[in-house]
Image (cartoon, helix red, strand yellow):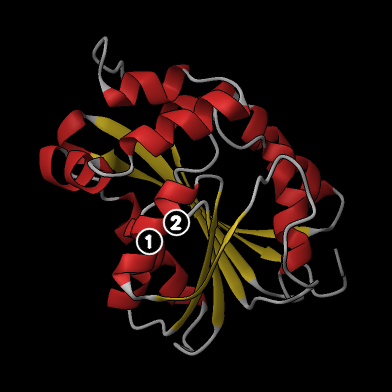
Amino acid sequence: MSYKAEEGSFLKRAHDTRNTAETRAFYTDWAETYDTDLTGEHDYVQPRRCAEMLSRYVPDRGTGILDVGCGTGLSGDALAEAGYRTVDGCDLTPGMLAKARETGVYRRLFEADLNVPPLDAADGAYGAAVAVGVFSFSLIHPDALDEILRLLAPGAPLIVGVNANFYEEGTLARKLEALGAAGRIERLTEEHGDHIGTAGMTGWAIAVRKASAISA
């Protein structure tokens, strides 16, 4: 089901921003009320959905996990609630990172523009990653998956949470298909469900695994 955000709303503005400077400024402005807007006014369930999906593939709660585009830490909170103890986060916006730091769930937080690699992390540094609400019309381009895969150990899973409107647009789906065809990832599962429940926005939770024989 397609969702159209109300004119003037933060969700509408988030979908309308297009370049890095606009995106950073928008999320800087939104940082103070982001959690309230998404978990109070709306029911942003995608972080919980993705943490639950990750738990199917990563039973070891001590595994090092990268929360890609961590924002204020909603996904980090969901991972912590699922029992994960070693979570790092990266985000484009310092204001969002400052709020994420207040959660106390992250081992390390660092600023990163996923559209301009490399990120400040070593090859194969993480045993899993989540990217919740990161890929969108105005945020991170699907080619950033190449850099996320570089940071994952061979065989490590990646969970992507994305709103249905963007997934239906096709660029992320085509990138995943290309990575699968090249033998760089194994497709594990895709599940359609709520994204922001009370807003009527649906989304996909997608699990893939980095191929064991691929190092980047």
Secondary structure type for disc 1: helix
| Residue 37 found in image quarter | top left
Determine if residue 2 is in view: no
User: Residue at position x 67%, y 46% from top?
Assistant: 114
- Tell me the quadrant of the picture where the N terminus can be found: top left
Q: In the picture provided, is 20 more to the left or to the right than 167?
A: right
Amino acid type, callout 1: Ala
Out of 133 and 214, give the one closest to the viewer: 133
Secondary structure type for disc 2: helix
Answer few, some or many: residues within 10 Å of disc 2's Cα (few below 14, many 20 plus, some between 14 and 19).
many
Amino acid type, callout 2: Leu
List x then y, in percent, for residue 72. Answer: 36, 54
Q: In the picture provided, is 152 more to the left or to the right than 58?
A: right
- Tell me the quadrant of the picture where the C terminus can be found: bottom right
| Residue 63 found in image quarter | bottom right
User: Residue extending furthest top?
Assistant: 7
Tally of numbered tags: 2
- Are dots 1 and 2 in contact, CB under 8 Å? yes
Determine if residue 179 is in view: yes
Out of 45 and 6, give the one closest to the viewer: 6
Q: Is residue 76 above or below residue 7?
A: below
List x then y, in percent, for residue 165. Answer: 44, 25
Residue bearing the label numbered 2: 97
Task: State the CA–CA distance, disc 1 to disc 2.
Answer: 5 Å
List x then y, in percent, for residue 75. Answer: 37, 60
Q: Is residue 119 above or below residue 115?
A: below
User: Residue at position x 51%, y 34% from top?
Assistant: 24
Q: Which mark is residue 100?
A: 1
Answer few, some or many: residues within 10 Å of disc 1's Cα (few below 14, many 20 plus, some between 14 and 19).
many
User: Residue at position x 61%, y 37% from top?
Assistant: 140
